[in-house]
C-alpha cells in the first residue's frame, strides 16, 4: 500500500531507539567510556578493560594515569618554554653614525640680564641667610632681625614660610621669630617621616592647602643650604612662569657666547652645526648633529682626534648665586630622535679641566608580547606624548605626571612641556599649586599615581656607554699664552685675558667602531613545539595526532552530547508529567492513553512488530495474556455425530 514505506521508516526508527546502542551514540557515559577503551589506539586504556583480575586492572589504571600526568607536566613545561627568549649578541665593525650631543650651561640665564626680576626674591633670600647663619651685607645682624620682626612680611614668606623644627609638633618661623604649631605631617625631602628625636637644627618650609589652612605639611631638609635653595627654586619658577619665552631666550646664552672653538673628525665646525632648543631649567641648550637638516654625521675612525672637540665659555661671574651652586656645563649623548633629559641623566663638565668622554655604541631589541611587556612605538600607551620625540619610558612618565598635574592642580609644572590648553603654574593665578604639586609628587614617587603601571619600556633603543676621564687644562706652562689666544678669539683685548675657571674643554669620541647589537629571539618555534608535543605523547601513551583528535571527540563532543541529551529527556519527561497532572484537561485524539497501547513508549499509531513486542513491558494491573487450551472433546466425532445424514448414506451405497 501507499503508506507501507512510511510505516517501515517509523518501525525502523522505533527499533533504533529500543535496541542497545554502542559507540559515540551510547546513552550513558560509562558505556561511551567502555566503547572508547575497547576501540582506541592508546594501549593503556584498552588494557584497563580487557585485563582480568582486579590487581592487574588497578596496575594498568595507575600506569595510565601516571602517563597522563607526565604528559600534562611535560607539555606545560614546553608551553612555558615556548614563551621564553634567548639573547644573542652580535658585534660588527663598521662606519658608525655619530650621536647627537646636547650641551647646556649649568647656569640657565645670565644673572645680569634678569637681576631686576629677581631683586625682591634675592633680597628676601639674603635676609633668610642672615637670620639663619649670620650672613650680613652692611647692616648688623641684630638691627636686621629687629627690622624683619617689625615688618609686615613679604609675599615670598607669606606663601612659603621658612621654619626651624624644634620638635615634631612645634617650629619657629625664621622670618617673624614666632613659634608655630605643626598640624600636618612632617616629611623629609625623600618623603620619609622625620622622627622627633632627629628634629634638632632641621630647616624646612611649610605648605598649606589654600582652601583648608589646617591641612598643611612641613617639608624638611638635612641641610639648610638645600632648604634655602629649594625654597628659592619654588619662587624662581613662579617668576619665570610669567615671563614670555622670547624674553627668556634673550637672557640665556647664545651659541657665540657658549662656543669658543669646535672641531669634528679633524675638521673645523661652527655654530651652524648646532641646533638650539630652550629648556625650562637650563635655558638655551645646543645640540650638535641633531639631524634636523636631514643629514646625520658619521665617523669612520675611532679615537679622540676623530670625535667632537669643543671649548666652552662658562662665564662664571654672571652666575645666579642662589640658583646654582656648581660651575660648568652639562652634556648628554643621545639619538637624534630622542629627547635629551639633561636634568635626569646629564653629565657635568668641570671648568679648568679637559674632559674626555669615550663611547661604546649598543643597539638593543626586545621581543614584544607575549615574550615581554614592552611597546614598539608607544601608540598602545594611553598617555599623550608632550615632547614631540620618539617614545621612551622617561617621556611617558613625565607626560603622565604633567597630565595628572593639570587635572589635579589646574596648571602645569614649569619644568615640563605644556599640554594643549594649559598654562604654567604661578601663585598669582594658582595659589594652591605648590601644595598640590608636592602632594602629587609624593604619590608619584610612591607609585600611587598609576604612571608606573601604565608606562612601559620601549622594545628597541640605542645606548651609548660613556667612559669619562678628566685632566687639568690648561697646563701651568701653557696657561698664559692659551688664555690670551682664546681671549683674542673671543674678541676681547689682549690685556684682558680670560680666566681658566670660565673655560671647559670637552672631547666626545668613539673608543672603537664596534657596534654591539643585542637582540632577543624566540627560544622555540611552532614546529619545534609541535614536535616536542608529539614526542611526549608517543613516549608515554603511544599516541599520535589522530589519537588526540579521537580524545577530543569522545571526551568533549560525545560526552557533552550525552549529558545534554539526558538533560533534555528529563526536561521533556517533566513537561509531559506536568501536562498529565493538569486538572480539567480534555483528552486529545493523539494521546497515548486514547490509542489503547499498554506500552507508554508506543506513542504513534503503528503497532509494534513481533520482535519489539517481546521487549515491551506488560501492564501491571492486567492479567498475563495466555493462549486458551484446545477443547479435546471436539475430536470425538462419534459422540458429536450419532446419526448419519441421508445424503451420505446414499453415497455409501454406491
Image (spheres, grey):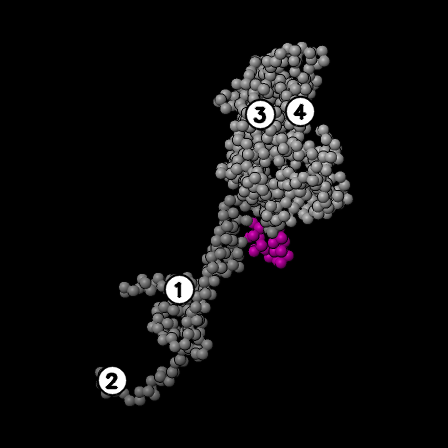
Label 2 close to label 1 by CB (< 8 Å): no
From the image, tell me which residue sits under label 4. Answer: 327
Numbered tag placed on residue 252 in the rendering: 3
Q: What element carries label 1?
A: helix
Look at the picture and state if 314 lies above or below 36.
Answer: above
Where residue 292 sits: x, y (%)?
50, 24
Where residue 454 sits: x, y (%)?
56, 41
Task: Identify the mark nearer the N-term, 1 or 3.
Answer: 1
Where residue 488 sits: x, y (%)?
61, 11
Look at the picture and state if 105 lies above or below 371.
Answer: above
As measured in the structure, the alpha-carbon distance from the residue carrying label 2 to the one carrying label 3 is 157 Å
Label 1 close to label 4 by CB (< 8 Å): no
Label 2 close to label 3 by CB (< 8 Å): no
Q: In which quarter of the image is the C terminus?
A: bottom left
Seen in the image, is 222 located left or right of residue 3? Answer: right
As measured in the structure, the alpha-carbon distance from the residue carrying label 2 to the one carrying label 1 is 57 Å
Where residue 316 sits: x, y (%)?
65, 22
* In the foreground, 478 or 138: 138
Task: Identify the mark nearer the N-term, 3 or 4.
Answer: 3
Magenta stretch prevailing secondary structure = helix
Numbered tag placed on residue 648 in the rendering: 2
Look at the picture and state if 633 lies above or below 66.
Answer: below
* In the foreground, 145 or 379: 145
Range shown magenta: 43-63
Q: Is mark 4 on a helix, strand or loop?
A: loop
Tag in front: 3 or 4: 3
Task: Identify the mark nearer the N-term, 4 or 2.
Answer: 4
Task: Identify the mark nearer the N-term, 2 or 3.
Answer: 3
Q: How crowded is mark 2: few (under 14 residues within 10 Å), some or many (20 or more)?
A: few
From the image, tell me which residue sits under label 1. Answer: 14
> Who's the residue at 54% across and 42% down the image?
410
Amino acid at each position: 500500500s501507499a503508506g507501507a514505506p512510511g510505516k517501515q521508516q517509523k518501525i525502523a526508527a522505533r527499533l533504533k531507539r529500543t535496541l542497545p546502542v554502542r559507540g559515540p551514540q551510547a546513552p550513558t557515559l560509562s558505556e561511551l567510556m567502555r566503547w572508547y577503551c575497547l576501540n582506541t589506539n592508546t594501549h593503556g586504556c584498552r588494557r584497563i578493560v580487557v585485563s582480568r583480575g582486579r590487581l592487574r586492572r588497578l596496575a594498568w589504571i595507575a600506569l595510565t594515569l601516571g602517563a597522563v600526568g607526565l604528559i600534562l607536566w611535560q607539555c606545560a613545561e614546553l608551553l612555558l618554554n615556548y614563551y621564553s627568549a634567548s639573547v644573542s649578541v652580535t658585534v660588527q665593525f663598521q662606519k658608525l653614525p655619530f650621536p647627537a650631543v646636547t650641551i647646556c650651561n649649568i647656569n640657565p640665564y645670565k644673572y645680569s640680564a634678569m637681576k631686576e626680576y629677581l631683586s625682591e626674591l634675592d633680597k628676601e633670600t639674603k635676609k633668610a641667610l642672615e637670620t639663619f647663619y649670620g650672613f650680613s651685607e652692611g647692616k648688623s645682624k641684630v638691627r636686621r632681625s629687629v627690622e624683619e620682626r617689625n615688618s609686615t612680611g613679604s609675599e615670598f614668606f607669606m606663601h612659603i614660610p621658612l621654619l626651624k623644627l624644634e620638635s615634631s609638633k612645634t617650629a619657629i618661623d625664621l622670618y617673624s621669630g614666632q613659634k608655630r604649631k605643626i598640624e600636618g605631617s612632617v616629611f623629609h625631602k625623600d618623603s620619609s617621616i622625620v622622627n622627633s628625636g632627629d628634629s634638632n637644627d632641621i630647616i624646612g618650609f611649610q605648605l598649606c592647602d589654600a582652601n583648608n589652612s589646617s591641612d598643611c605639611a612641613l617639608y624638611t631638609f638635612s641641610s639648610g643650604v638645600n632648604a634655602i635653595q629649594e625654597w628659592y627654586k619654588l619662587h624662581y619658577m613662579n617668576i619665570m612662569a610669567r615671563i614670555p619665552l622670547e624674553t627668556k631666550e634673550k637672557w640665556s646664552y647664545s651659541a657665540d657666547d657658549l662656543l669658543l672653538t669646535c672641531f669634528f673628525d679633524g675638521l673645523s665646525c661652527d655654530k651652524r652645526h648646532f641646533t638650539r632648543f630652550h629648556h625650562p631649567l637650563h635655558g638655551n641648550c645646543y645640540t650638535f648633529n641633531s639631524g634636523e637638516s636631514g643629514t646625520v654625521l658619521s665617523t669612520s675612525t675611532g679615537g679622540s682626534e676623530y670625535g667632537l672637540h669643543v671649548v666652552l665659555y662658562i662665564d662664571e661671574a654672571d652666575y645666579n648665586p642662589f640658583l646654582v651652586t656648581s660651575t660648568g656645563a652639562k652634556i648628554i649623548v643621545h639619538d637624534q630622535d630622542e629627547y635629551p633629559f639633561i636634568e635626569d641623566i646629564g653629565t657635568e663638565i668641570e671648568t679648568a679641566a679637559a674632559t674626555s668622554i669615550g663611547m661604546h655604541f649598543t643597539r638593543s631589541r626586545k621581543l614584544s608580547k607575549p615574550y615581554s611587556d614592552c611597546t614598539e612605538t608607544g601608540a598602545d600607551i594611553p598617555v599623550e606624548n608632550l615632547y614631540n620625540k620618539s617614545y621612551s619610558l622617561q617621556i611617558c612618565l613625565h607626560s603622565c605626571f604633567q597630565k595628572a598635574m593639570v587635572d589635579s592642580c589646574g596648571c602645569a609644572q614649569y619644568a615640563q612641556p605644556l599640554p594643549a590648553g594649559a598654562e604654567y603654574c604661578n601663585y598669582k593665578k594658582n595659589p594652591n599649586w605648590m601644595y598640590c604639586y608636592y602632594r602629587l609628587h609624593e604619590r608619584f614617587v610612591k607609585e600611587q599615581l598609576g604612571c608606573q603601571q601604565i608606562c612601559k619600556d620601549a622594545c628597541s633603543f640605542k645606548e651609548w656607554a660613556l667612559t669619562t676621564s678628566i685632566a687639568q687644562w690648561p697646563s701651568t706652562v701653557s696657561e698664559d699664552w692659551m688664555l690670551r689666544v682664546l681671549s683674542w678669539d673671543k674678541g676681547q683685548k689682549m690685556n684682558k685675558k680670560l680666566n681658566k675657571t670660565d673655560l671647559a674643554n670637552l672631547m666626545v669620541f668613539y673608543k672603537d667602531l664596534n657596534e654591539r647589537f643585542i637582540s632577543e629571539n624566540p627560544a622555540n618555534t611552532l614546529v619545534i613545539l609541535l614536535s616536542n608535543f608529539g614526542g611526549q605523547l608517543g613516549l608515554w601513551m603511544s599516541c599520535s595526532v589522530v589519537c588526540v583528535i579521537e580524545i577530543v571527540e569522545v571526551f568533549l563532543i560525545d560526552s557533552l552530547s550525552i549529558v545534554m541529551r539526558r538533560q533534555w529527556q528529563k526536561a521533556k519527561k517533566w513537561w509531559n508529567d506536568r501536562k498529565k497532572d493538569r486538572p480539567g484537561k480534555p483528552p486529545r485524539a493523539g494521546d497515548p492513553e486514547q490509542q489503547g497501547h499498554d506500552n507508554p513508549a508506543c506513542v504513534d499509531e503503528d503497532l509494534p512488530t513481533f520482535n519489539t513486542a517481546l521487549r515491551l513491558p506488560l501492564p501491571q494491573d492486567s492479567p498475563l495474556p495466555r493462549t486458551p487450551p484446545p477443547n479435546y472433546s471436539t475430536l470425538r466425532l462419534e459422540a458429536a455425530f450419532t446419526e448419519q445424514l441421508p445424503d451420505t448414506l446414499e453415497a455409501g451405497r454406491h
